[in-house]
Every structure is written in structure tokens, then in C-alpha cells.
Image: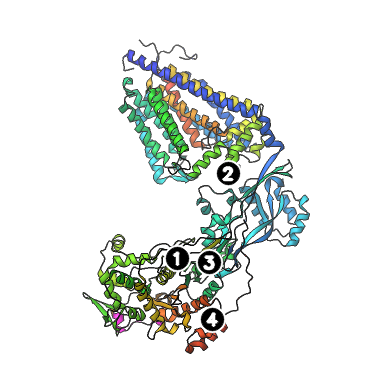
Amino acid sequence: MKLPSKTNREKQRRITRRALMLGGVQMAFIGVLSWRMRQLQVKQSSQYRLLAEENRINIRLIPPERGLIFDRGGVALAANQPNYRVVIVREQAGDPARVLADLARLIDLPEETRQDILDTMERHSAFVSVPVAEHLDWQDFARISANAPALPGINTEVGLDRIYPQAEAYSHIVGYVGPVSDTDLARYENPDPVLKIPDFRVGKTGIERKLEDLLRGSAGTSRIEVNSAGRVMRELGRSEGRNGADLQLTVGDDLQKYAQYRLQGESAAAVVMDVQSGDLHAMASTPGFDPNLFIYGISSKDWNALRDNPYRPLADKTISGVYPPGSTFKMVVALTALEEGVIEPDEFINCPGYYDLGNRRFHCWRRGGHGRVDLSNSLKQSCDVYYYEISQRVGIEKIATMARRLGLGEVPSLPLPAMAAGLVPTKQYKQDKFQQPWFIGDTLNSAIGQGFVLASPLQLAVLSARIASGRMVEPRLIRRVNGVPQPLERPPRIGLSDTQLDHVRFGMFRVGNERRGTAYASRIAEESMRMAGKTGTSQVRQITAAERAAGVTKNEDLPWERRDHALFVGFAPYDNPIFSISVVVEHGGSGSHTAAPIARDIMLRALYGTQPPLSAYPAEIRSKMRLQQEQEPAPAPITPTPVEDRA
Amino acid sequence: MTILDPTLNQPPHGWRKVLHVNWALVLLITAVASFGFLMLYSVAGGSYDPWASKQMERFAAGMVIMFVVGFTPIGFWKAVTPLVYLGGLALLVGVYLFGHTGMGAQRWINLGFIMLQPSEVMKIAVVMVLAQYYDWLDPAKVSRPLWVFVPLMLMAVPFALVIIQPDLGTSLLILLSGAVVMFLAGVSLWYFGAALFSGVALVTAVFLSRGTSWQLIKDYQFRRIDTFLNPELDPLGAGYHIMQSKIALGSGGVSGRGFMQGTQSRLNFLPEKQTDFIFTTLAEEFGYVGSTILLVLYALIIIFCIASILKNRDRYGALLTGGIAATFFFFFAVNMAMVMGLAPVVGVPLPLVSYGGSAMLVLLGAFGLIQSAHIHRPRGIVN
């Protein structure tokens, strides 16, 4: 009351009026609520009471059938098999504990399992079906069905389970399904109610995960009327769901299995790709694992064995493994230099075995040097000094641009999770990452695919496919969806002239088909199928000056994890390329000894489509190859299922 | 002036305050809360555990808080208003930094003895600070743009802190409660008209944008709106709650199915039956008669608060009472509209009835402020 009373009264008047207005509005809204209450509870009451009491309507979800996955030849990679099982619905059971006890007299159902089921029921709504027993044999199933009237709330169902008939061979590509976890639910803004059905399965890795929405389809619903005892009176309506789409992959025709077999025992990856269409015919990564282990939740023993294996069986090395590409990167540098015109193909550079940059000496892998080498010879013999020289002339930025054009340094577009981008270094990259300027020495290291450069086996296969075809080929994994072929467009040209590409292709040809080529020992003898390629041996350790002086330690004398990675990339036939290939053997020693023979065998298998005749191999190794072919396990007889439209 | 002690002509002191408590309001609050105990007993299947007994204890504690706050002079509360507001902001920041995440949102802070939801406190604090602001401001200036801007800022800061939790419902309630205080303080109706108009324009724009390249909200948000408008579209997803809740209400009929006889809540058809959807149990078991009685009790609480404002010449006390009453109104109005299918499903409890400790204590504390304003209002003949 510090203000004069006149002003005070003025204030008082206004708040009075506004307070009455506010009260009026509030009362009006209460009036609306009251009107609505009358409408629901008096006018429409009988209708709602009907819904609530006399006809309790249950809505059941009809889970969709998950789409199948086939390989290129129509062999099932992921299939559904019937699962005879019984479920219990709490609201129909009356006394679930008693019903379960009765059921235990018909089938084997230990006390603890029954308790688990009761606990699960408590966690779910009353109308949800909770699984009691799965994978029953036909006899048990029939016995329960016959006794159904005495077991209220117990329903028999035929569900579908996922199986992976090819087990290990496709484990990384196809992936596996598993129970829905909270993390899975969190991935969706608005999870499909079907995910909340107990024991529903969703894709966890591979295509199963990445194309989950396509494979899952959508649930149908069935509205059924039940009487007060819970007996189903009739079905009132039904909305059909949509089954998941069937997928046909580009991999297969037995090549995948052979590649997986050929890499056995190593921690390795191989990719075979069609150089025109980009179809991936094989994506092998060893060791594999059995995806069937995961469907019902893997045992901790199996899980620990997979997790602790130093060869990392769970990782798909073709897409998530990144390696220094080593000498396989030299094509990138050669193409950059040709395009920029800093070198002529027939220009000679002298290799004394080392290259001095300031006071630092960079060594060629061959201590004695290669003498005078031109472009194709530099590839054939994998001369490092040649690339030290031309990389300096052209600079890292141009090399990086070319590497990206050839498919390195970015995530390939495939429907697979956990794909690595690899790394194509630039000056900016080093500044951002290490706060250090780029040195010329870094360019030299990059030129031979060491230092910062990283690439995945898939990227290396794309690289060599682009060199072989001269086009911007993109890898492709899905061939058909529900029987409908996926469109293929002829990719645009890469922007390099055929003359430029031919110089590099010729160098790659010499690698495998001329004496002193680094892969000459692994050549293909059959004229029409000769392979062009490039070996790579990438260091995973630093060789010190002291070690170099004392003689570099041989790979065989090093512990496994410090040995060099062995790489090979290539394409064949040289005259008319069909496939490109990349092989990476982790800590495999040298590219020419370890990776090149594997690449030759897989490539021959791809070209012939079956076991190649011995005449495809050079004469001096035919007896050895005969032995190798005889040891190969006979392919299991498989009947391809025709891929037709199920939708 | 009260029939208990009609002779007083200045604010009471000491024990005499007891006679000047707004006893009608106390009785109404107790009556509403008793409805809550009854329903919590019923949804637990005829048991004091786990909800009814705890709720009674909290109600008792809340009543003690209400009387302590009520007997404290309103001048004290006016003086500490800035501290309450800043303290509330500090708690909100604290939640942002150290809060507990529950149900996908960060709302709770652990004070050791109680899990507190600072946004609850903030709703009251915003009303207090705006009341104090308009008490201080010369009424002739209230509609000038600059002086309208200041309270908007006072609301914007807590609004922003609550909306990032994220809690859209509570942040909108903060805005609405603040808007009510501004309305009571006499801010020109043109401002409210403009705000309403731009709100309607925004909603229209959102709907018109659907399916176009400049779509303003996400597809799933549109689907939620669709579900609200037509719950039968999605009877198993979000529409399930609205459908089941309407079935419960409707099947109650005029006289209800009888105490503890509701099948909908008994059979677990209803979600959150002890908190947000408790009104459906009441409506099912006590019918149109029971739900109307509860609605009338709520209406009476509002009417008694408005009556208290009309009697109060202290601008701070009147604005505070009006703001708190409006907050209370928004709570039950939005909750009831939601279960009746008039508003989308948002997590707002039914005040004094729904199970929940933090909300109950804060609400009764706020009613304590209304009591304090009522007890200590200026008396006597002016002029």
C-alpha cells in the first residue's frame, strides 16, 4: 500500500475484470469437458460397453514371412524353415501356472523353464503370446493339439525360423538375424509393433541388417471376437500383411565357396568383380563363422572363441579391413603422371637401388637397383625409385584426386554395414589430423602405397576394374528383388584416354606374363585368359637403418602379426577383361609368393566357372596343381531353387 | 474477512492466522486427493500397496508444507522470488549437466532424499517472478513493447532449458502459465490476439506443407497427429491408448460399473493406469456421476481461487494466485482432454489424483502460496 489509493484502485479494477474473463474462459472449457463426458458416457455408452464387455475384440498380429536370399545361381543362402511350437496367452489361461503344470505331463518342461515362462508373461501384456516350447517334433506337437481343450490359453503354431544352409561361406555378406534388442528398437523412430512380438528376429549384420526393412515386410492383423471364456468365436476382419522381399545376390555360382576355401587357414580377403557391370561374384573373407549359431542367441563359449581369435572371424575384411595398398597403388601414381604429362611412357629413369631426398635415403625394395626403367617395366618389376621420382614431379594433391576417381578413399555404395572408407591422404588431411605440414617424404611414401594410404580389398577390386574397363564401375551386390532384375546402367567413362590406360594395362600384363615380372610364377598359361595384375607387399613395421645395414629380417623369422601384408590386384582376360580381382592376405609375407597364386586360382575358377583344366597352368607346375585340385573337397550337390516372385 | 473471525481489519498475526486460512480450498483439495486414494487402491486390485499408502503419506507431507508456506507472510515470498527463480534455473542447468535420464528424456535431479523434477518447480517460479515483475511495474506501462519484452525473456530462458530435455508438454505449460499472468496484469489484448493468430498461421502452414518440398515437420510427427485424429487407423500402436481409454470411459455409463469392477483397468488394457490414465479408471468405475463430481470439485477449486483474487488488493498476491490456479487448471484440463480423445497423448498427470510424489509436493507447496496470499491480504477500508 505504498501507492496512492487512486492508482491502486485503478490497478485493482483491471485485475478484477481480467480475472473474471479468465475464470469465464476456464469455466467454458470445463463445460466442453463436461459435454464430451456426457457424449462418451451417456450418449455412446452402450456402444462402448459392447466393445468392452460382450465382444472383447482381440487383435492378433500375423507376422510377415521374412524374404529369402539366393545366390546368383538360385541357391538359397537364407531360408525359412517351419518351427512347430506352442505358445501361451495369459488372459486366456486363467491360472497359467496350473496350465503349464498340466502341459509338463505331455512334453518335457522342467520346473525352471516354467518359472521363466511365467516371468516372461508378467513382463508382457495379457494378450501377448509367449513361447512355451519350440522345435517340437511332430509327435509332441500332435499330442498337444489333441489335448488342446484341456489346456486353456495354450495355442499350437507353426512358426518360421531362419536358417543359413550354406553356413560359413556367406557368413559376412548375408549376416544373421537375432532377437530384437533395445538397441534395435532405438534405431527406429516408430518401431513396427511386430518387433515387440516375443522371439521376433531382426537382422544383426550383413545384408540381413542393412536391408532389414525390405526383408521384413509388414505385419497383417486379424481382429477376432472372443467370448468371456476366451474362446475365439469368429474372425471379424483381417488385413493381410506383406511378406518380405526375396533378394538375389550377384555372388555365388560356387565361386564364393571356392574363394572362401582357397583362403582357408589365412586371415585374408578376396573380391571378384565384373569389370563392366560391377557385379560382385565373390567376396570372401576368412576365417568365416557359422551364422546359424546366432539365431537363438550364441553361447558364451562360442562367442568368446570368435571374439578372441586373432584372425577376427566376425569382421568382413573385404569391406571393413583397410590395409596399406603397397605397390598396388603404383597404377594410381602412374596414371596421374601420364594424365598430367610429367612423364612419357618410354622415358627412362635410372634406379640405383635408392633415392636421396635431402639427407634422407629412400630405398628400392631391390637393394641392387633396377637400372634404367620405363613405365611398363617399372610396374613389371615394381621399381620403387621410379615412383619416388614421378610422384615428386606430380605432387600429392593430384595423386589423391586420381585415387578418388579410381574408387579409393570413399565408402563404396553397397547395402552392407560397417564399410570402411580407407584413406587417401592430402596436405590438408595431415594438417588437420597431426597439425604437421606435409613433407615431400610423405609423398614418396604414399607413392608406393605406404605411409597414410589405406584401402579395403573391395576398393582395390574397384580400382582394377576401373583400370580394366576405363569406366566408373560401381560395385553391385543385389541382382534381383522379388524376381525383378535391378536396373544396370553403363557407367560413364573415367576420363582417361585408352592410350594412357593401355600403357598401365600393358605394364600390368608384363607383371604376370614376362620373365622377371613379380607375378610371373603365378601366370595363366591359357592364351585367351592371360591375367594382368600387380603385386603388393605392404609393411606393417618400420625398418630401421640399423636393421637395413644388418640385412632386413626375413618375414618367416618374424612373429605373425609383424609380417608384411601380401596383396594382389588384377584383371583377366587381358585382351578382353571380364573380371577384376583383389586378394589381401594379412601378414602373408610377399604379394608375389602368397597373394598372386591365390588370385590366379580364383580367377581361373571365375573364368571357367568350374575346376579349370591343367592346361591352363604353366607346364612346370601342372603336377603340383593336379595334387592341389585332387585335395579340393567335392562340391556338395545342391539343387538351385528357381527364383520366382512370391509377393 | 471470514465468518470465523469477521472483525479483523488488518492482516492477522500468530494463531489468528488459522482462522483466516481458505478452509474451503483445503476441503476441496482433500476431497480431490481422496478420490485419488480410492482409485489407486482400486487399480492395485484392492490393496494399499504399492500406490495408495505412499500417496497418502505424500499427501500428508504436502499438507504440512502447504500450511508452513501458507503461514509465512506473503511479503517473505515476494522477497525471495528472485532467488526461487534463479535457483530454479540453476537446477535446470544442473539437470542438463548431471541429470538422470528416464523414458528418453533428461528431467530428474537427485537431491539425495528425493528425485526432483526441476521443471515442476520452474512452472511455479515463472509465475512468481512475473507476478513480482508486474507488481513492481507501473500499470500504465504494461503494454509498451519494451516492458512486454522483459517478461517474455523471463519465460524464454526456462522454456528453452525445458524444451531441450526434451519435454515439449511442460515447456508449453510454462509459456501458458506465464501468458496467464501477463493477461491478468492487463497486457493489451492485441498482443494475445497476435500470438493466437501467428499460432494458428503456423499450424496451418505445417498442415499445408505436408508432402511438399518445404515440409516443416517430420513424417512420423504427422503420423502421430493422424493417430490422434483417427485412432482406429493404428489400433495397435499409438492409437491403442486412446481407443482403450475411450472404451473405458464409455463403458462406465451413467452410474459406472461399481468400485473395483472396471474390466478395462483390471485386465491391463489401460496403460499407465496409476498415473496419466487414472481418470479412465474413475470414469469406468463411477460413471458419468463420478467423473462429473470430480470435474465439479476441480471447477470449485478454480472458482475459489478466482474469488480469492477478487478479494485481494495486493497485486503480487492476486497475480500469484491467478497464475498458480491457471497452472493447476491446465494440468487437469489437458489430462482430461487427452483421455477423452480431445487432445493428443501427452504425459500430463491428473493433479492431486495421479500417483507421483514430486508433482504432489510441488503442487501443494504452490497452494501454500495461494493460502499465504489469502491469509496476508491487505484488509480494511481503503480511501
Asked if badge 4 and badge 2 are on a common chain, one would say no
Mark 3 neighbour class, 10 Å CA radius: few under 14, some 14 to 19, many 20 or more: many
Q: Residue B48: in sight, yes or no?
A: no
Q: Nearer the viewer, residue B49 or A325?
A: A325
Look at the image and give the residue range highlighted in magenta: A546-559
Please name whichever residue, A392 or A87, is drawn nearer the observer in this view of the structure: A392
Name which of mark 3 and mark 4 comes first in the sequence.
3
Picture layout, residue A457 above or below residue B242: below
Chain of the residue on which disc 2 is drawn: B
* Quadrant location, the C terminus of chain B: top left
- Report, in whole angstroms, how far the alpha carbon at label 1 lies from the one at label 3: 19 Å
Residue A378, percent from left and from top: 33, 79
Residue matched to label 1: A320
Can marks 2 and 3 be said to lie on one chain? no
Question: In the rendered structure, the residue with mark 1 lies on which chain?
Answer: A
What is the crowding at mark 1: few (fewer than 14 residues within 10 Å), some, or many (at least 20)?
many
Quarter containing the N terminus of chain B: top left
The amino acid sitting under disc 4 is Pro
Residue that label 4 marks: A612
Instruction: Tell me the chain of label 3.
Output: A
Task: Look at discs 4 and 1 and give the one toward the viewer.
Answer: 4
Q: Read off the residue under disc 3.
A: A250
Asked if disc 2 and disc 3 are in contact, CB closer than 8 Å, the reply is no
Q: Tell me the element at label 1.
A: helix
Which label's residue is closer to the chain start, 1 or 3?
3
Chain ID, mark 4 = A
Q: For the residues carrying marks 2 and 3, which lies nearer the camera in this image?
A: 3
Q: Nearer the viewer, mark 1 or mark 3?
A: 3
Q: Nearer the viewer, residue A538 or A236?
A: A236
Residue carrying label 2: B237
Q: Is residue A135 left or right of residue A146?
A: left
